[in-house]
Image (cartoon, rainbow, N blue to C red):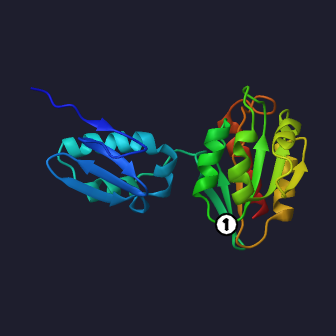
Amino acid sequence: EGRLYHFSMVRSVERGMGIVGETLVWRDEREEMLELEALPQWACLHLDNVVATMALGRILGLSMEGMAAALGSYALPPHRLELVSEKGGIRFYNDSKATNPPAVARALALLEGPVVLLMGGRNKGFCFDSLKNIVRKKVKALVVFGEAGEEIARDLRGLGISILKCRRLEDAVARALEVAKRGDDVLLSPGCASFDEFSSYKERGDFFRKMVQKAS
């Protein structure tokens, strides 16, 4: 007879993997726990997939600690909160794959320092005011660019942060370099498609990486 397992991102489950606060909880014959901080930073961007995969791993007999260690040895593909440079105490992240507001929010939640955030491109039909709380909490300066720049600036105004408007990503990177200070994180997390200026998010991310590395 088959056994049914569940996974949840918001609560513990009777049998399976769930999250309670900042803890992963596995329940079957016995209960096991693992703090989320034991997972690599990137895993929190894809927590739904990670929780489901770890649930399957426990069913197959893998340990929570062993799976966390294995995840730590895995590197995400480029353009997903990719640390491309660190100089003068400033960290530069390429998150060009983030083409919608929820993806931007996930990236911001993972960064520690005050953030200089670069957003823009071609809007995919989203409103950006859902980002107000996380932007108010994490962002010191917002640099907008591309077709959606004005719309992003309008949706995120009134938060007590600097908003700098640029035409192209090249200009936005230059402005970000001007305002970033030691301890800051410069994050390209556009929240938009790339097609107003680039052929793909990959081309956009590669361009950002090259500009940052050239400046560094």
Q: Position of residue 71 (x, y in %)?
A: 38, 53
Quadrant in the rendering for residue 177: bottom right
* Image quadrant containing the C terminus: bottom right
Residue at mark 1 = 113
Quadrant in the rendering for residue 103: top right
Amino acid type, callout 1: Gly
Circle 1 residues within 10 Å: few <14, some 14–19, many ≥20 = some
Asked whether residue 165 appears in the rendered view, the answer is: yes
Query: Along the line of sight, which residue is nearer the eye, 43 or 25?
Result: 25
Q: Position of residue 214 (x, y in %)?
A: 76, 58
Asked whether residue 97 appears in the rendered view, the answer is: no
Quadrant in the rendering for residue 2: top left
- Identify the residue at image location x=49%, y=50%: 44
Q: From the viewer's perspective, is residue 154 above or below residue 212?
A: above
- Identify the residue at image location x=64%, y=53%: 108
* Image quadrant containing the N terminus: top left
- Image-based side of 65 in relation to 117, left or right: left
Q: Position of residue 158 (x, y in %)?
A: 86, 51
Which secondary structure lies at badge 1? loop
Query: Along the line of sight, which residue is nearer the eye, 26 or 72?
Result: 26
- Image-based side of 140 in relation to 33, left or right: right
